[in-house]
Image: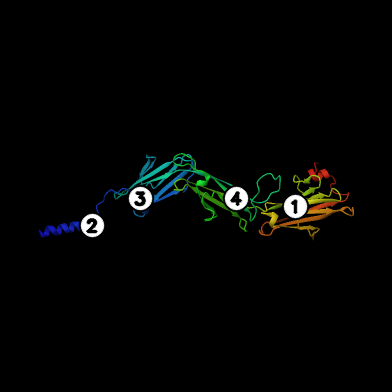
Amino acid sequence: MKRFSLFAVLFLCLGFVFPIVTNAQSDENLDEIMNTTIFPEIPGPRQNVDISIESYTYDLSRSKISWYINNSLKSSNVGQKTFSFTTGEVGSVSSVKYKVTTAEGYNFEKTLNITPGEVNLVWESLGYTPPFYKGKSLFSFEGTARIVAIPNLISPNGTKYKQEELVYTWKHGMGTDVEASGYGKSTFYFNGDIIARPEDITVEVSNLNNTVRASNKTTIQAVQPEVYVYENNPSLGILFNKAITNVFNLPGNEDSLVVEPFYFNNPDNEAQYTWSINGQDANEASKFITFRNTTGEEGHSNIGIDVTNQKRIMQSVNTLFDIYFGSNTSKNSLLENIFGNQN
């Protein structure tokens, strides 16, 4: 009797030391056992997606792995740790499931529901352009830009999410702008660095429970600001249709010119203007300047204008041109001053 009791005790002890292998369905700690990677992390519509799995607990190279899409078996092989598929249209759901049967007989499975969305980014520079300017203001050195995210995300019930009911995460370069991110924050403002380089702006958009997501990135390249001088004709006003580049002919004994700082930020309050005549300071700090030929002499002078943003040192530019006066000018027609030489 004692011998039987001792054998029973030994059997129980061996049972604890060498556990009997059973089939264990996926448990709550699956993420600790199986590492799942999706690339890209936030897929868009009609985009190829790669899914890979890895485990430091079990040898997946010896495990049978089956892949399903919407409960339809697509592939099943030993050691198939990667799987690729293409997402559907915006709002469609791709239910991707993998089942793992290890060499020890353990079973694990996980389902990934992927709903693609999209978001467009529209940006504009807040740099100045004069009236009647055709086109988009360029983003200049140390400039300020505004970016608006326009999402297209569809809820599970088929309705499109409103722009103001989504969560936005904005990144400037590698860092997340926590202050600019949040619920309903679809607009992002940023200032360019003093070192001119491409500005990478990324946005991630999601619904409140983070089940529908989209992302996009845009790169904005800063440019040198520009200045152009125009005639301020007393009868016709500022002639924005023709900039003065190399030569200007004083049409009479007096005429006014105006300089326009393209792509400068807040030039009305921050720009400083410095005019020069033949290299000498003209003592004129306005964007307007008036030239008079009080003696009636013939000749020409070299005119310079330097425009500097006092708060953004990289927004600084200048230009030079010659002004001819008197009857013996290089071009003495008012029409040529307005429309240019047609020859």
The x, y position of residue 269, in whole percent, is: 69, 56
Of the numbered discs 1 and 3, the one sitting upstream in the chain is 3
Quadrant location of the N terminus in the rendered image: bottom left
Q: Is residue 265 left or right of residue 149?
A: right
Q: How many marks?
A: 4
Q: Of the numbered discs in the image, which one, if any, rests on residue 146? A: 4
- Find residue 172 and report its image quarter: bottom right
Q: Going 82% across and 52% down the picture, which residue do you hit?
A: 323
Of the numbered discs 1 and 2, the one sitting upstream in the chain is 2
Judge the density around disc 1: few (<14), some (14-19), many (≥20) Cα neighbours within 10 Å. many
Q: Nearer the viewer, residue 269 or 44?
A: 269
The residue mark sitting in front, 4 or 2, is: 4
SS state under label 4: strand
> Is residue 174 in view from this perspective?
no
Q: Would you say the residues marked 1 and 3 are in contact, meaning their CB atoms lie under 8 Å apart? A: no
Of the numbered discs 3 and 2, the one sitting upstream in the chain is 2
Residue behind mark 3:
60
The residue mark sitting in front, 1 or 3, is: 1
Residue behind mark 2:
16
The residue mark sitting in front, 4 or 3, is: 4
What whole-number distance in Å separates the C-alpha atoms at marks 1 and 2? 90 Å
Amino acid bearing label 4: Arg
Q: Of the numbered discs in the image, which one, if any, rests on residue 38? A: none
What whole-number distance in Å separates the C-alpha atoms at marks 4 and 3? 48 Å
Quadrant location of the C terminus in the rendered image: top right
Amino acid bearing label 2: Phe
